[in-house]
Each structure stands twice: as C-alpha cells, then as structure tokens.
C-alpha cells in the first residue's frame, strides 16, 4: 500500500555536472540517487501494475506500515536494520526480499548491503508481480555469479544494417545510434550533455537486469573520445546513468598517443614502447583526465592488432607487454583494461581460428621472476568471444576457455544479431548462450565439478577469481531500444544469464514474454515455443551441421556460399570447402589440427568424425556426401532436410503469431507480423541458394520427400 525508502536522497555522491539537463519535454526525470531511483521505480511500477496510486511514504523509526514495501540498506534504513537479518552472505550487489510479520503488521523488505543491490531487489520484486508470481511469504536471497556484467556498444559499425539501405542504423538495425555526440540537423540541439529520455529508459532497462557498465564506443576506436569536448559529454552521460549502477568505459586506440588531436601532448611512433615510461605516462595523463570528469570510469577496452587496428606488434612488442603497459598506466586510477583476443591471420596459420591461443597462451604460461606463472597484470581482463570464429549462430566453445588459468578472462557474447538475422529475423539467442556456458571444457587443472565454461567465466573454477562477461549490445534509438521487438529479449536474457548463467533460457523467455506481451497462458506458451526453437531453426536454414560463415562478405545477412573475395578467410568458400568429395572444414589432426588446442578429451572427440556431435560436424571435418548420419540417412539427404526443416519452422512461427492477433495490441502485432513475413522469405532464400550451390558438388538430386520441389 505504500513504498518506504528511508533516506533516499541522502547520498551526495551523485552530484551532477552543474548544467545536467533533460531534453525539453522529457517524460523521464533525472534520478539523484540510487535509492531515489528505486523509490521512483516502485511507485511507478506498483501504480501501473495495480491500477491504483501507490505513493512513497516517509517513515521515521523502525516501524513499517502494514502492507508496505520497504527498500534500503542497514545504513539507510532503520526498518531494514531491524528486520532484514544478517546480510553478510550476500554479494555487494545482491539482495534479499523477505516478508516480515511484526505483531499485527506485515510488510515486505527489500534489503541489500548497497544501494544498487536494493535497486536490483526492487526490480526483482516488480518482476515477480508482473509475471504473476506469488509475493506472499517471500524469503529470497540473490547474488550474481559474475561480478562485472558489461556491455560493449559498437556505435559506428554501419555494416550490418540488414535492409537498412542508408546505413545509419548499423548494428542497431533500423533503430539508429543511441548516444548523440555529434548529431546534426534537427537533432543538433539534442547532443550530449543534453540527456535524452532514451538514455534513462535504457539505464532503467539495463539496471533491471543487473548490467553494471557500458563501453560506449566501438572497439574499432576513434581517438576523439579522449578529447576534452568528448570527455565533457561523456561525463554528463555518466552522471545520468550513475544512479542506475551503470559505469562507463571507453574503447581506445593503441596508437592514440600519436594522434595530432592531442598536440602538443603527442608521442612519436618510436615512443609507443609499452614497456617504457613515455607511453605509460601518456596513458596515465589521459586516463586521469577522463577520470577527473568521471570518477567511476571503469576502464579501457582495447582491440589491438586485430582487423587492421594498431597494436603493440606494430612496434615490436607482444600482447602481454601492450596490455600491461596500459594496465600499469591506469592501475593507480583504479581502472581495468579489457584486452580483446579476437585475432586471426590466415597468412601465418593454416586455419585462422588458431591465432588467439597461439598468441596468448604462452604469455599466460610464462614463468615470472617471483616464481608465479603468467605475465598479464592483475587489472587486465582478456576478453574472448564465446566461439573461435566470430559470433556464428553455432560455434564450438573457444578453446581459450580453461586454457588461460593465470589470467582473468571475460567472455564476449554478441547480443546484437550481426550474424543471426540482424533486425529482421526473430532469433532468441539465450539457448545458444546456455549451450556455450554449459559446455564442458574438460580442463584438467580445475576441480572436476567446476570445469564448465560458466565456471571458468564466473571464476569458480579458480576459487572465486574476479569475473566478467561482456555483451556486444544492440541498443538503438527505437522506442523499444532494439528495433525488432523480439531482439529486446536478447538484451533481457543476456542480463539474466550474466547474473546467473545456470538459469534456464526457457524460464527467462517466459518471464520476458509475460513482461512484454501478456500473462495469458496461451500467449506465453506459444511465444516461448517460438523463441525456444528460433535459433536452432536459423542454424538449420543458414548453416546446418556446423558449416559456418556463409554470409555475403560485406553485410553478414544474405547467403553467398560461392563467394570468393580477395581476403581468403573473408570468403564463404574458405569455410565450406565444397568439392565433389564433400563439405566442411577439416580441423582434425589430418587437417588444420585446430582440434589439438582443446583439452585432450575434447580434442579427441572433435578430432574424430564419428565422435563429433553432428551439430558441429562441418566445423571439424570435411564430411563425405555419403557419410551415414546417426539416423541412418546419408549426409546429403540430412543436409537438405535441415535446410527445409529450418524454413518450415519459420513458417510455423509466422502462422503461430498470426493466431495470437486477438490477444495482442494491434501495433506491435503488426510490426512483428511484417518482420516474420520477411524472415520467412529470407530463410527460404538461404535454403534455396545454399542447397543449389552444394548440389553442384554433391551431384545428387534434391530429395523431394521433404517438400522441396526443385
Ligand atoms: O564480427 C566482426 C565484425 C566487425 C567487428 C569485429 C570485432 C567491431 O564484423 O565489425 O569489429 O568482429 O569483433 O572486432
């Protein structure tokens, strides 16, 4: 009946940039503290969910009104102090939600050690109500498994706009870039430091699933983000997001010290030696400048010697020295370096997948003067994509996981659907992420019950090491932040799995469906079913049985299996290796021998055609057209069947969605309907294009018993 947040405005640490202001006519308000944000969420949320005004009530002392929801920490709230019990078992940003009976009154306490934990608990309570779970007799303790749950935002990547011809949407599909730094024309007066409604909407959405930070610029980084003009804008953004527990980080260019924008404070190329003081001092000076404006700046994200970005190797040093040079510069400022491991070089390796392990593993193993192993500094996280290639809808686990036991390692997942249908196809990615996180690494030097990829990522494999997970985010300026309504489920699911990777992706889909569409059981069942099969269907009609990366080189949406481009490994043909003998990439010991980068049990399983799981068959083997599959069918027939099965699923999704029309609001129903129609046509195009091309090599008729006609 009332929301009680004692001392909500007592926190001084949120003092904003003096002129921080919302855009004119804004519907959102700037929160001035985290507990203030919690109070606002709860009053707004309860009022909306219950259809009657629920107000915040000031209360002194330790007596809560009957029926109240009390939020806070032992420091902020006497009621919490008196009734929440001992919170020492919770993580700093964990929370407790407990029903308290005290004499004749009953109330709910949302308690945490920190304000941000209290905000997370408030969202969790709202979620329970919104998904129609019971809120009686609550006794819930929640702590995140992974410490840092971070997003990378690739603001300038135009490439994957799908059908967005003008190229402004980039990875955000049609929804455009989210942060205005230098908008022109009609939006010119809406550049930062002006705070747009959508930043607050975003912050609330991210905090509601426990995201702790964002690297706001593309990893292909431009130096301008370190200039005074930009820093001022970034500081305003940081101020606005701070109450929601979202810290900023920046992507940096390794050779920024030579950029003339910083003149006269520039270095010459021969001063880019990361082991020496000029380089370190430069980075320290410039990090300190940002840090003065953004005291909680988390750190720098670095893409070095990858896809043409500059890095230490250009100047005769390795990744260990490069990462450590910047890490040493920012360590006194309490900052971290997220150093990406996305490297490949087919000119050096017979298989581009091998490079990361070859570069990083020796540094991780290197004996140190103090008798320990591993050269990477303590404030370095190596940031590694889940798979060894590049965010395909199905990849085996990257062999780096479990192999870097002396170095902190973050897993990078792609939330934005670069290779998974962009903003056109409905693809719920959580089942794939779950498959990744639950993969057994068979690592031999960690406890046997702690060797799943999730244990490596959450640090439990190493006795609780600091941990981090990163999602390449799909934020845009659409009302729903993501363009396709269903893409929002991926942002939601990323946050939920980052909090607890053992949660079931189906449960997460059900929560999202109830919160987004309806609590009607028929709607929930249908939508969850659509979502749960959607990624497997996409794998089927795009890249079944482990054949990877068949996308048109410069847009990553359409199929192009016959394409051959200048750079060998950017060609679909590099991956499919189609010939009259069969299809797929031999990475076994008889081929590239990539499989030997795995721990022995996996190396053996993947190295052998018969023991390789069928879903990964062509990742590891050149599969003969007449290879007999588990179900007794020849490979060629099964392959064609998979393509057809994938398209059929999309047809089913479109029909199932149509059947939901009476239960959904007209606008969003229509919008998804239109996407599904396009999705179905594009899926059929994938099937037809790929099957026709494979047929040139299999030289076998296309089986017609699956409904394929030509
Ligand atoms: O997936 C590929 C993309 C590049 C991207 C790169 C990376 C930002 O095609 O656009 O660069 O990965 O992860 O660095």
Image (cartoon, rainbow, N blue to C red):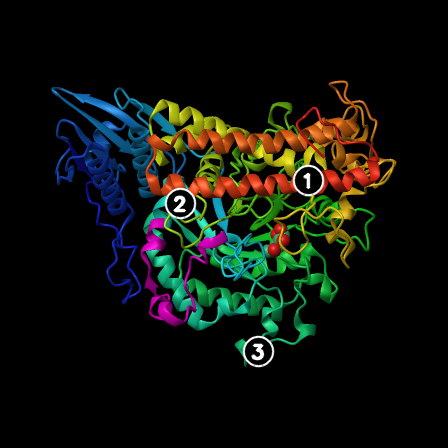
Residue range in magenta is: 173-201
Whether 641 is among the magenta residues is: no
Where residue 35 appears, as percent x and y from the top left, is 26, 44
Where residue 491 appears, as percent x and y from the top left, is 46, 42
Where residue 197 appears, as percent x and y from the top left, is 31, 55
Q: Which mark is residue 260?
A: 3
Q: Which mark is residue 688?
A: 1
On the question of residue 480 being in view, the answer is yes
Q: Earlier in the sequence, mark 1 or mark 2?
A: 2
Task: Measure how far apart labels 1 and 2 are at the Cα level.
Answer: 39 Å
Determine which residue is flagged by label 2: 206
What crowding class fits label 1: few (fewer than 14 Cα within 10 Å), some (14-19), or many (20 or more)?
some
**Image quarter of the N terminus:** top left
Q: Nearer the viewer, residue 107 or 529?
A: 529
What crowding class fits label 2: few (fewer than 14 Cα within 10 Å), some (14-19), or many (20 or more)?
many
Q: Earlier in the sequence, mark 3 or mark 1?
A: 3
Q: Is residue 563 above or below residue 311?
A: above
Q: Earlier in the sequence, mark 2 or mark 3?
A: 2
Q: Is mark 1 within 8 Å of ligand 1?
A: no
Q: Nearer the viewer, residue 7 or 620?
A: 620
Q: Is residue 248 left or right of residue 441?
A: left
Q: Are marks 2 and 3 in contact (CB under 8 Å)?
A: no
Disc 1 or disc 2, which is closer to the eye? 1
What crowding class fits label 3: few (fewer than 14 Cα within 10 Å), some (14-19), or many (20 or more)?
few
Q: Residue at x 36, y 23 (%)?
A: 521
Q: Nearer the viewer, residue 129 or 284?
A: 129
Q: Residue furthest front?
A: 709
Q: Nearer the viewer, residue 594 or 279?
A: 594
């Amino acid at each position: 009946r009332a929301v009680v947040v004692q001392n909500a405005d007592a926190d001084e640490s949120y003092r904003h940039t003096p002129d921080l202001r919302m855009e004119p006519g804004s519907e959102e308000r700037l929160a001035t503290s985290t507990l203030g944000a919690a109070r606002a969420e709860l009053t707004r949320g309860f009022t909306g969910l219950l259809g009657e005004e629920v107000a915040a009530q000031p209360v002194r002392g330790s007596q809560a009104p009957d029926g109240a929801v009390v939020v806070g920490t032992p420091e902020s709230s006497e009621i919490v102090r008196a009734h929440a019990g001992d919170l020492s078992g919770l993580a700093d940003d964990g929370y407790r939600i407990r029903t308290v009976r005290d004499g004749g009154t009953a109330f709910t306490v949302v308690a945490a050690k920190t304000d941000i934990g209290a905000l997370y608990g408030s969202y969790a309570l709202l979620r329970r109500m919104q998904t129609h779970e019971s809120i009686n007799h609550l006794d819930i303790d929640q702590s995140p498994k992974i410490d840092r749950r971070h997003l990378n935002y690739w603001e300038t990547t135009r490439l994957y706009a799908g059908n967005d011809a003008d190229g402004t949407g980039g990875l955000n599909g049609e929804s455009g870039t989210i942060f205005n730094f230098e908008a022109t024309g009609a939006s010119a007066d809406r550049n930062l430091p002006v705070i747009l409604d959508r930043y607050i909407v975003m912050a609330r959405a991210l905090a509601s699933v426990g995201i702790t930070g964002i690297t706001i610029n593309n990893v292909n980084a431009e130096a301008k983000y370190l200039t005074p003009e930009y820093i001022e804008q970034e500081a305003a953004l940081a101020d606005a997001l701070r109450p929601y527990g979202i810290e900023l980080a920046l992507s940096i260019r390794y050779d920024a010290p030579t950029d003339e924008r910083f003149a006269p404070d520039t270095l010459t190329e021969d001063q880019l030696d990361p082991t020496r003081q000029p380089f370190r001092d430069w980075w320290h000076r410039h990090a300190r400048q940002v840090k003065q404006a953004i005291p909680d700046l988390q750190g720098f994200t670095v893409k070095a010697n990858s896809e043409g970005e500059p890095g230490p190797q250009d100047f005769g040093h390795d990744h260990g020295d490069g990462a450590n040079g910047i890490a040493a510069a920012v360590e006194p400022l309490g900052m971290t370096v997220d150093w990406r491991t996305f490297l490949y070089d087919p000119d050096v390796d017979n298989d581009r997948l091998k490079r990361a392990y070859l570069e990083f593993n020796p540094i991780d193993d290197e004996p140190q003067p103090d008798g320990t192993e591993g050269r990477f500094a303590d404030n370095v996280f190596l940031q590694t994509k889940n798979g060894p290639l590049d965010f395909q809808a199905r990849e085996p686990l990257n062999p780096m996981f479990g192999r870097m036991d002396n170095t902190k390692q973050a897993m990078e997942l792609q939330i934005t659907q670069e290779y998974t249908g962009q903003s056109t196809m409905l693809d719920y990615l959580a089942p794939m992420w779950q498959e990744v996180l639950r993969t057994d690494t068979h690592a031999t030097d960690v406890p046997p019950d702690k060797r799943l990829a999730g244990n490596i990522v959450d640090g439990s494999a190493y006795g609780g090491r600091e941990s981090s997970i990163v999602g390449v985010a799909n934020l845009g300026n659409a009302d729903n932040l993501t363009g396709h309504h269903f893409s929002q489920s991926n942002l939601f699911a990323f946050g939920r799995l980052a909090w607890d990777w053992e949660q079931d992706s189906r449960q997460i889909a059900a929560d999202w469906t109830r919160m987004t569409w309806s609590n009607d059981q028929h709607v929930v069942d249908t939508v969850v079913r659509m979502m749960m099969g959607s990624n497997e269907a996409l794998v089927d009609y795009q890249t079944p049985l482990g054949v990877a990366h068949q996308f048109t080189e410069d847009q990553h949406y359409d199929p192009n299996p016959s394409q051959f481009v200048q750079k060998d490994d950017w060609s679909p043909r590099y991956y499919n290796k189609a010939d009259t003998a069969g299809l797929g990439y031999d990475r076994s010991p008889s081929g590239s021998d990539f499989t030997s980068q795995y721990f022995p049990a996996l190396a053996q399983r993947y190295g052998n055609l018969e023991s390789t799981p069928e879903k990964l068959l062509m990742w590891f083997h050149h599969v003969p057209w007449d290879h007999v599959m588990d179900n007794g069918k020849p490979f060629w027939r099964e392959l064609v069947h998979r393509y057809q099965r994938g398209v059929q699923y999309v047809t089913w999704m479109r029909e199932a969605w149509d059947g939901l029309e009476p239960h959904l609001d007209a606008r969003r129903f229509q919008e998804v309907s239109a996407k599904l129609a396009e999705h179905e046509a594009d899926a059929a195009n994938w099937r037809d294009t790929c099957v026709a091309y494979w047929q040139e090599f299999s030289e076998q008729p296309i089986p017609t018993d699956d409904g394929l006609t030509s």
